Image: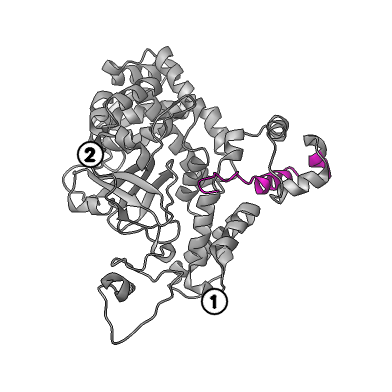
Amino acid sequence: MAGKKEIPKLGGRLRQLRRREGLTQQQMADRLGISPAYLNLIENDRRPLPAHVLITLAQTFSVDLAAFAADDTGQLQSELLEVFGDPIFEGAELGTVEVRELAQSQPALARAVCALYRAYQSARGQQGGSPVALESVAGEAPSEEVSDLLQRHMNWFPDLEDLADKVRKEGRIVDDDLTRGLVRFLEDRHGVTVEVIRASQGQSVLRRYDPEARHLAISELLPPRSRNFQLAHQIGLFEAKPFLDRTVADQTLTSDEARRLGRVALASYFAGAILMPYAPFLEAAESMRYDIELLGHRFRVSFEQVCHRVTTLRRPGAQGVPFHLMRVDVAGNISKRFSGSGIRFARFAGACPRWNIFTAFQTPGVIKTQVSEMPDGARFFCISSTVKKSSVGYAPQQSPQALGLGCRVEHARKLVYADGVDLEHLMPVGVTCRLCPRGDCTERAFPALAAPLHVDENVRGVSFYASPLQVLG
């Protein structure tokens, strides 16, 4: 039936959990109160996972139901399509159906394939294309692993939200005197002295904590809003330590570097919750219709900090607009990504150049809007703008970055940026060139996976990879 929502297939997740626990199907079935034959059907997605069994699963194995049932198959499928879109797989005849079945039925195997491909790419890049043993190549970049962790939790950490509210209350931290309240809390609760140091004492360091002397140094190069963020970040490292230790022990993070970076990311989440407490911030965001700049003025935070905070408004019963967020540099490198809207990001190749985040560099500081349509028909409303890092003086030159923030088009009218925008005026975009089926795109960098390159020396179109007949037709 058209429009019918597909029931999530959880068999692969259940099988992965069973194997991680070291149980046979008989042992798992006994614990869940079902027959081994029925468990086998569930694991192979031939029967749905009943609600009562899911509840038993959560109680027996301390499983987070939201995380267990979260549908991340689409993103995994998209990553696999990117992998098999590489020219090395030409002729393999692997289509969408086969890839979807692999992502749904064998998610662990699918992720292993992606990890192997990342190692292959890294080896190829490090050796200039020459062969190299894959075992000599490090695994996935720590930042990618941390992004995966945040994505799996949908950037929602209620424990940090509750702790931030508790710290604000116990520390009597109020918006009108944030800096004083944060410094007082560090001194009274943790015996930490805070000093603002001059740039000449360490221009490359913006925050440094000395655990031996219990001394926190903040650079004068940071504006007041950034100083507050660093103070709150340090409080998060102290107050949320048990939660940080527990969360970064997740198997998603495979190296010490990734775990340390995960602690930084979660402490930053805590800092955002301190400076922009959930209930007042959500109320302001809805009343201001998500005007990022006005929210920044009210809560004394930066444009980027507000953009990060609006992606975390996922409290049950008090949710904000589900946003996606991406940050890129002028070379197209994606340094941050999170999808709360369902949009798919390129994992192994360059993103679509039609995304308005790339045009933000043409008009620095100006917020640009775009209504886009993906090849599968999904529509998104997005804004983008360049962002400026905290100044470090005149001499150092910093590369500009741009932020893209967006939501599904049905939420667009909740945003002030959609006023006067024709939401039916669509820009066709894709995830990445190899996966995009549009043959009439004049900005193609590579041929589409579904349409191999055909060269006619007698015909030259406006793009080498676009079909001249489709462009002219």
83 sits left or right of 63 in the view: left
Neighbour class for label 1 at 10 Å: few (<14), some, many (≥20)? few
**Where residue 51 sits in the image (x, y, percent)?**
68, 33
Query: Is 406 rendered above or below residue 108?
Result: above
> What is the three-letter code of the residue carrying label 1?
Gly
User: Which residue is pictured at 69% across the width and 31% down the height?
Assistant: 55
Q: Position of residue 331 (x, y in %)?
A: 30, 58
Is residue 24 visible to the viewer in this orientation of the structure? no
Left/right placement of residue 76 relative to residue 412 reads: right
Which kind of residue does numbered mark 2 sit on?
Ser
Would residue 434 be found to the left or right of residue 332 on screen? right
In reply to whether residue 36 is colored magenta, the answer given is no
Query: In terms of depth relative to the viewer, which is nearer, 135 or 76?
Result: 76
Residue at screen point 39% across, 46% down: 336
Secondary structure of the residue carrying numbered label 1: loop
In 3D space, how far apart are the residues under numbered discs 2 and 1 (Cα atoms)? 60 Å
State whether residue 420 appears in this view: yes
Numbered range of the magenta stretch: 1-29
| Picture quarter with the C terminus | bottom left
Determine the residue positioned at 30% across, 57% down.
354
Pick the front one: 165 or 440 = 440
Pick whichever of labels 2 and 1 is earlier in the sequence: 1
For the point 36% across and 82% down, which residue is it? 455
In which quarter of the view is residue 136 placed? bottom right
Q: Is residue 436 above or below residue 15?
A: below
Residue for badge 2: 200
Q: Name the residue under label 1.
A: 91
Please tell me whether residue 135 is drawn above or below residue 62 in the rendered image: below
Q: Tag 2's secondary structure?
A: helix
